[in-house]
Amino acid sequence: EITLGDVNEINIETFEDCHLPFQMVEEAQFGWTSFLETFSSRDVAGEAVYSAIFESAPSLQGLFKTPRAVMSMRIMMGFNNIIMNLKSGRNVKQLVETLGFQHLNFEVTIPRVAIFRDAILNLMKSESGETLTNLGFEGIKRTLNFAGGGFVYVRTNYSERLRILSSSWRLVCGKQAESSEDAAGSGERSAEAEGSGEGSESSLLHKNEASDEFDKSRNKSKAKNNTWSRKE
């Protein structure tokens, strides 16, 4: 008998690698592939998943500003990547972590995770029929629980750290900007001082040249006077 899960199965206290029994992974992947094959394309399958989720909880549609067609494909491709990587628990964790970071602005809660999970499970059960075994269904359910719990964990534990890092980065950038302004001001003052020094040197040079010209003129005058004195 196939039964849906409850909210207590969603773990938000820890976030480690996802490990499922090998046979369960095999059945889950087969069940998911069979489910996709009941539709004419991935786009149609994504639309069906999107409709199932938001028909079960219309209020959730207000959380998403992305166009429906784009959002349905994102949901489809995101979950497909997770399912297809179930044989590597570390890869699954990294995928969920990445998706969690991409959706930090959404208020992901346990009840909302349960709505998503149950909507997808109900759709798969109705579309797949007997091709979805009990073991495969359980694998899909555990995967959805893991992904949803990971989203909540990331939002709860990482968003505050990111806020602190962002605040610290802005503070550092502000101090660097102030230092750059101070350095620029010092450079301008140094340039002004050098310009003033060059002006003084130039003025002194002109004074020396004028003094030399005056001395030459006076010497010529003396020589002329001496010449006239000898003639007399």
Image: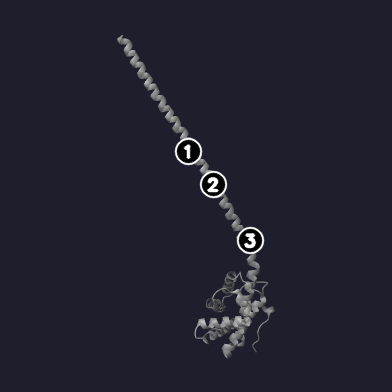
Q: Residue at x 61, y 55 (%)?
A: 171
How far is mark 1 from mark 3, CA to CA? 47 Å
Work out whether residue 102 or residue 217 is closer to the camera in this orientation and state it: 217
Q: Is residue 193 above or below residue 206?
A: below
Extreme residue in the left direction: 231
* Residue 224 occupies quadrant: top left
Give the color scheme: rainbow, by chain, secondary structure or one colour.
one colour
How far is mark 3 from mark 2, CA to CA? 29 Å
The residue that disc 3 covers is 164
Few, some or many residues within 10 Å of mark 2 (<14, 14–19, 20+): few
Extreme residue in the top direction: 232
* Residue 100 occupies quadrant: bottom right
Q: Quadrant of the N terminus?
A: bottom right
User: SS class of the residue under badge 1?
Assistant: helix
Extreme residue in the bottom direction: 130
Callout 2, which amino acid? Ala
